[in-house]
Image (spheres, coloured by chain):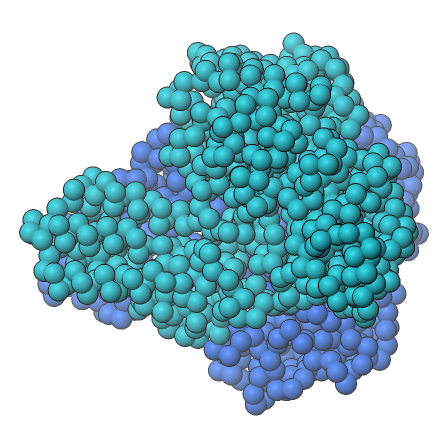
Chain colours: A cyan, B blue
Amino acid sequence: MKILIQIALTGFITLILAGVNPAQAETYNLMPQPAKLEPGAGRLVIDGSFRVALEGYQEPRLEAAAARLIRRLSLETGIPFRDGLENDTGKATLVLHCDHAGEAVQSVREDESYQLDVSSDRARLTAPTPVGVLRGMETFLQLVELDTQGFSAPAVRITDRPRFPWRGLMIDVCRHWMPEEVVKRNIDAMAAVKLNVLHLHLTDDQGFRIESKEHPRLQEFGSDGHYYTQAQITGLIAYARERGIRVVPEFDMPGHTTSWCVGYPEIASGPGPYQIERHWGIFDPTLDPTRAETYNFLDTLIGEMAALFPDEYFHVGGDEVNGKQWNTNPAIVAFKQAHGMKDNADLQLYFNRQLLPLVQKHGKKMIGWDEIFHPDLPHDIVVHSWRGTESLAQTARLGFMSILSSGYYLGTVLPAANFYQLDPLAGPAASLTPEQASHILGGEACMWSEYVSPENVDSRIWPSTAAMAERFWSPQDVKDVDSMYRRLAVVSRELDWVGVTHHSSYPLMLARLAGRGSPVTLETLADVVEPAKHINRRKVREYTSFTPLNRLVDTARPESEKARIFSGWVDHLSANKDAVRKQLIIWRESRAELIPLMQQSALLQEDIPLAEDLSAVARAGLEALDYLDTGRPAPQAWVQEQFVLLDLAAKPRPEELLMIVEPVRKLVEAAQRGSQQ
Amino acid sequence: MKILIQIALTGFITLILAGVNPAQAETYNLMPQPAKLEPGAGRLVIDGSFRVALEGYQEPRLEAAAARLIRRLSLETGIPFRDGLENDTGKATLVLHCDHAGEAVQSVREDESYQLDVSSDRARLTAPTPVGVLRGMETFLQLVELDTQGFSAPAVRITDRPRFPWRGLMIDVCRHWMPEEVVKRNIDAMAAVKLNVLHLHLTDDQGFRIESKEHPRLQEFGSDGHYYTQAQITGLIAYARERGIRVVPEFDMPGHTTSWCVGYPEIASGPGPYQIERHWGIFDPTLDPTRAETYNFLDTLIGEMAALFPDEYFHVGGDEVNGKQWNTNPAIVAFKQAHGMKDNADLQLYFNRQLLPLVQKHGKKMIGWDEIFHPDLPHDIVVHSWRGTESLAQTARLGFMSILSSGYYLGTVLPAANFYQLDPLAGPAASLTPEQASHILGGEACMWSEYVSPENVDSRIWPSTAAMAERFWSPQDVKDVDSMYRRLAVVSRELDWVGVTHHSSYPLMLARLAGRGSPVTLETLADVVEPAKHINRRKVREYTSFTPLNRLVDTARPESEKARIFSGWVDHLSANKDAVRKQLIIWRESRAELIPLMQQSALLQEDIPLAEDLSAVARAGLEALDYLDTGRPAPQAWVQEQFVLLDLAAKPRPEELLMIVEPVRKLVEAAQRGSQQ
């Protein structure tokens, strides 16, 4: 197939281009790292005279992009550019040259390559397509920084193209409704790190979040009034296209459809009536795959939505059908028997086989979660893997296209390094032939929204998603974690100017928690706390769509930068002993101000044990330092006592982790040995 | 005159109502303080079941207001309210009762009074007019806070109305263009503190910022494309009216009109051609007051703008005519002679006399700066005093209405206390009779925009303007500065939720300044720095509309909270000696990280002396503490050395002040005496 050959070729070229010297790249704050970077001599000064000119093929998208570039550069530098856009390329600081138009509807085949040449007197960005120009623009913006002379970009030649053609972010707008502005600012941030697919999870048990004119009771009864109008969706798609991003809609079926059944119980497998689901999990309501009425309904719905979303792919979900309604509806049981189906998997396969021609009839290719896969399906479907890399590799082996999301779930609140180190072509996929591997189109970060609201969703998506964006874009051998974290810190700050609220929401949420107290006091604790990983929050308290997400667990960042830096100090203790001691003293003493503050806040009382632990663990660390200073092993009784303390402090309380426990454990272990080594 | 009688009556009633016990009020975080507050028993719980119902007179503005209240409360508490608006008043947590419609066009005569009753099971807000409801809503929102039990409002009865009917904020959108969203978010913040007049300074030498369809070259040649379309203005006026705020437009003339003359040199007093002015000051271009063509032009312009702005007042500026063009144009010189005018003041009076009937013809009353005043003018004009309280009192004595802006200039970057302590009816106005005093309608905070951009303008307006809002609204005897600062800190945080960027822009600007360094390090210095007062920034560097406002002086807040708190500790040293010492050690040691960071940033190099001073001054403070510990006076040589150091450190460098100098001077003086007393 043509597309596969092209992708295989792209992969091959990428390997050739990947000759970037990591040591050189280290001095540039680029994320994702480009395929190839050759340093030049000198720097291009950015001052009030900065101007951009367009050259070659022109279209409104390029003009808008140039205007955005000027605005971003103005925001980031604080310089008002008197004349931003310039007609005369000879007078421009930056020339954007585009060869020809891109695809009318951007696809996985879109050419995203570009070349960026910065010299000490001008910069030139050339790309075959507008999307390539968009990608290169973001690279140019990342190059600009302040040094001793002012703002400038280093002279450099960058030749760049993506490793994978499908680099996505999925946002679940169902469990918690995400208004238009949340999606828009995240599109801007996606563009900043060269992602190219926004996957909108538009329907689920908790909400049907898009206007259907054909079946208006879907949103009228299934959304609490929180849905995108078709005009808004058209606006979002245009907004995304302007930034080189595809929008893939998901209509999850036949399970996860409670919200559909509220207005249309006749397409459900059980009798109803139905109400919008407020909890999380796998629920019974499921479309009835045995009746023509269901397919008539879907035909109209898919037709309507296929016309609204120009993307060639249509995501039909397909995950987590519990089968209860299918097992208890006598008509469905009889249908299965009549058709010789041995289980509900057979019935779901039957459903998918009816669904596929509907999707195709309306001009789309089907994508769905792992469960939709069956070897009989046509080879232009894409399997979206949430179950693991084994199923991903297996799908590719059978000649099917797939994308990986297993391991890229942002809701796990894991460190960026975890996401970064997961390569779609590593693990089980490493044994694939190059031809098989070319079926793996890329991956998607997934933001399921059980535990995020518009207020804190950005803080779960960013900056980790930038690390995944590098994994999907950059050559496979770009994988140094320290370098990633160093650059991630820079790109994370740049994302502030792009408009996401991952930083700005934090002080507001802290101030709310602190009530009459000082948010600065609370920050001492909150900065070293993370939401617990691998716990079921529903076991701590009942969570529904209406539960306020205004507690410390919702405020704390997925990854504590402060704790990570402290941990690095401990790992190189001899060079950082003073800093470690100073920091431990602050934490040990924080108790005096923290506890009274937390006692007077109804939202913080449950977290007081964390504050107690912070102080106690810091005290243990300080004592360990004192023992180390003696040069002799610490008494065993003391050591055992500290381990008991640390083991307790390592537990989630109630839904958060104190991130200084493990580095302090290292200090205690060193004291036990009587040596830093 | 009816209006004056009503205002006088209002003033009288306010005095009666002002029986609030300051000690009681102290436990409420209200700003402005209400006229009367009676504490009740218990608290009204705010949880997910919170609902609002409207009662009595209804209009869309009230429904929109209730929806905004629910949204704000949801933002501030983090609680998603399942059913916000409720039809059944019996089920509502908060009932909003409005008696009747307000004025079709809000004026100084609008009734803004309200009564708010909060008990432990419900709240009821009653007001004669929708504007009264809007005022009371903000009071309700300010009452809600987090305590040991959750979010709640204290039981209370508040009976409230404003002291002055004109409580304004002027924003200059000419020297630096302020896009629509800047104005909108500031309207929201104004409403939060019960201000009721937005005065838009729409034209000046540096820009004509509004679309004229009659004279389109005004904005086409005079704005660099930065102006409000008429549709945007209509939108802004509607937005303001929804929040109980009048919009008074200013067309400053006959001086400050360079931007007019670019497109229409024929109405200027000099030959032209003209270019948009890029500097600040008083410039020559002035309308020609001797020719009929000028008045024909103004007739059309005022007619067009009078139809666009519904407010009864039309601000004609009138300030700072330097008269150079009038003195050098032979025709104008001849005109003056022919009409027996002895000076340019006579000519400006002539201009105003021609202008007034044009303003009146289009249904408006005239307001202008001090210079327009003449005893012959009709008594419905308003004199806008920028020259001082003496002219204000004099105007009132002569039976003319006036508002005060002298002393309320935000560009002075003075502490909030300075603005707060200036009462329009104190000083020269204190000797006015009650009837005369009633002519003083109120005041306006003025944000001239020479040294502010959309990025930092909010940080100059807020929170100080909240203190002025209290001055204009609350009874005259509400004037305790400590109480003001305590409440200001709370309202300042609440304004974050309203959407102004006075807090959120700070870390972004710090990060930009820090370049590759850590903004947290820079914060140690920036937190105790203020822009210098009473200096002419143009003497430090050339400033124009295109000069980047991205330096430390533009980033530092007008008032350092940290320095103010530190100063308070020093004033009560015996209770705060540990805190003072700890803080001084941090500052003394900050040098090691600050200087390298500042050396590598082109924008910070000029500020390195400040960082040196921070460290040296802190060292002096620590040494003073050590001497105090000895109980004996410090050696005179040491004392003199410190005074030399402090005198130097007290100077602006280059445009900023180090705010810890004065409190440390007190420590040195105490060491000199050998005693804290």
Instruction: Give the side of residue A486 with respect to residue A567, left or right.
Output: right
Does residue A331 appear to the left or right of B178 in the view shown? right
Percent coordinates x, y for residue A581 in the rendering: 22, 52
Residue sitting at 62 percent across and 75 percent down? B47
| Residue A655 seen by the camera | yes
**Residue A551 or B242: which is nearer the viewer?**
A551
Q: In the rendered image, which quarter is residue B422 located in?
A: bottom right
Image quadrant containing the C terminus of chain B: bottom left
**Image coordinates for residue A592, horizontal then vertical, percent:** 30, 69
Where in the figure is residue B233, as x and y percent of width and height?
A: 81, 47
Farthest top residue? A90
Residue A233 seen in this snapshot? no
**Which quadrant of the figure has residue A529?**
bottom left
Q: Residue at x 14, y 54 (%)?
A: A672
Q: Residue at x 89, y 47 (%)?
A: A300
Q: Is residue A204 above or below residue A234?
A: below
Q: Is residue A44 above or below residue A290?
A: above
Residue at 43% x, 40% y is: A417
